[in-house]
Image (cartoon, rainbow, N blue to C red):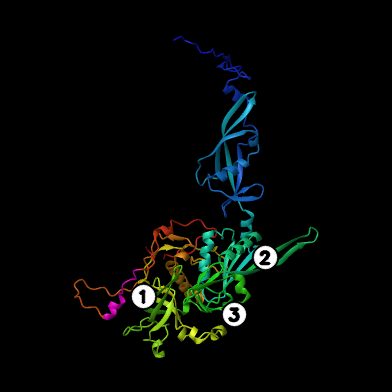
Amino acid sequence: MEFVPAPAVHRVLCADCGTPIVPNSANLCVACLRNTVDITEGIPKQASVSFCRNCERFLAPPQAWVLARPESSELLALCLKKLKGLPKVRLTEAHFIWTEPHSKRLRVSLTIQKEVLTNTILEQTFEIEYLVQHGQCPDCAKLAAKNTWKALVQVRQKVPHKRTFLFLEQLILKHGAQKDTISVKEVKDGLDFFYSQRSHAIKMVEFLTGVVPVRSKASEQLLSSDTHSNTANFKYTYSVEIMPICKDDLVCIPPKQARQLGNISPLTVCTRVGSSIQLLDPATLQTCEITSAIYWRNEFNSLATVTDLVEFTVLDVEADGRSRGKFVLADAQVALAGAFRSGAGQDEDSMDYESAGYTNQIYHTRTHLGGILQPGDTALGYFLTNSNYNSDDFASLPAERIPDIMLVKKTYPNRRKKNKSRGWKLRSIGKEAGEEGETGSGRGVVGRLGGRDQKKVEEDYEHFLRDLEEDPEMRSAVNLYKSTDVNMKTETKRGPKKPQFAMDVDETPRQIEEEEEEEADFPEIQLDELLEGFDEMTLGEGREEVVEAT
């Protein structure tokens, strides 16, 4: 095989140092070319960035403030925009150089390329140091002064409980609707949300319209005006009223409106609340949807709320065969809870049905809970026979169309008596320290005012947690978090401790009755429904109620 020599490589000497190099237009080696031409000329080696320590945002010139995490791509893009001469060169690589977390310096390494001579491209890597200057953004400067809000959203609901706002608070947190809120204040019948911009308040009103049935109206107040430039400064207020009908409420629809809604029975139960409410007739499983526009055209209130529910013991259930979704129509025989127990004690707040003659009476009713009720279960319902409602629509109903009992939902009294701690917890919108109405007890927005209604708010919160446990559809609309530390201070009823060699005696019937078994179908919350930890919140951390172990 014949040897073929490679083509000769012609080399010349560098004009400065005399090193043999491949010929180029400058006749200089790379080292001498870098000493002669500086492609980083015009790019500052030091710069500064403005940082607000209150909201943890950086200034993006000229006036925008953006949220960027340390060593993130957003912060890197913001730093590169501060360099004036960078568009004249080609940027090939940029990354952060590690600095101490408490340092007020940001170090960025850049690699750039630039054509210095004909067909000669020079690449160079250098470092830029940024000084982090602390300051206040305009929004935080307004927060430092009082009464600097520009828009206010007043949310009200005229009901005697707070469960609606507890659920609404979780919806706001799940969808992140609180991120633009300056502060939140609790008032008698609702909450006030303060905003620095009118657009943020309008966005909140639109969110509320999509999750709950509301009606709203807007007003504005003139603060100052300039006749020369034809400008004015206003404060905007949006009043939002939530429909005063909640889940599991007993509702009597006006007869004329009931005929327009598919000729449904006027006596119904509210089964779902969203942008509209869903009413169900337990005797026929007929449902109807009432939107905000239909309701506010002809308003009506609920006859009774969940505080009026009475416990009943199911004696017999026979399914009818008809069903609609999760509801199964059935005939049930029920009696008052504890009606057939000898010497059973009553609660202090419970009514004395024995003197009224209702104790041992068995009632027959039709219910929509045929799919979950079994003989021996306990259900909550409205005792219509023993109730007196101040409603003209209810009084106009024929007596044969009013049932004795209307069951609403199944309950689990044996499990509730044991006061077991829950293994999940909820987030809450926290309030700023020193804000008007702040009590410093570490609670969330609802229930911070304290006073005489504090015990009632705690009861409403416990009922809200039970609704989350028993209703998977309602639970899917909120975020539940794992409880890292289960509260061990839960009060439990324990008997006196026996001595080591005490003689065993037979337990009394009352002690055996207290130690009843738990319900087998108690709705346990699975671990896959829980989130790992808390996310960062705009208004600080709030309630971290420890709620049931799975």
Q: Nearer the viewer, residue 425 or 208?
A: 208
Which numbered disc covers residue 256?
A: 3
Span shown in magenta: 509-520
The secondary structure type at the circle numbered 1 is loop
Q: For the view shown, which residue lies furthest in the top direction?
A: 2
Residue 518 inside the magenta-drawn segment: yes
Residue 531 shown left or right of residue 53 in the figure: left
Q: Which quarter of the rendered picture does the C terminus lie within?
A: bottom left
Can residue 18 be seen here?
Answer: yes
Type of amino acid under label 3: Lys
Type of amino acid under label 1: Asp
Which numbered disc covers residue 314?
A: none
Q: Earlier in the sequence, mark 2 or mark 3?
A: 2
Dot 1 alpha-carbon crowd within 10 angstroms: few under 14, some 14 to 19, many 20 or more: some
**How far apart are the alpha carbons under marks 2 and 1?**
53 Å
**How far apart are the alpha carbons under marks 1 and 3?**
37 Å
Which numbered disc covers residue 236?
A: 2
Q: Which residue is mark 1?
A: 377
Q: Is residue 195 above or below residue 504?
A: above
- Report x, y in % for residue 409: 43, 74
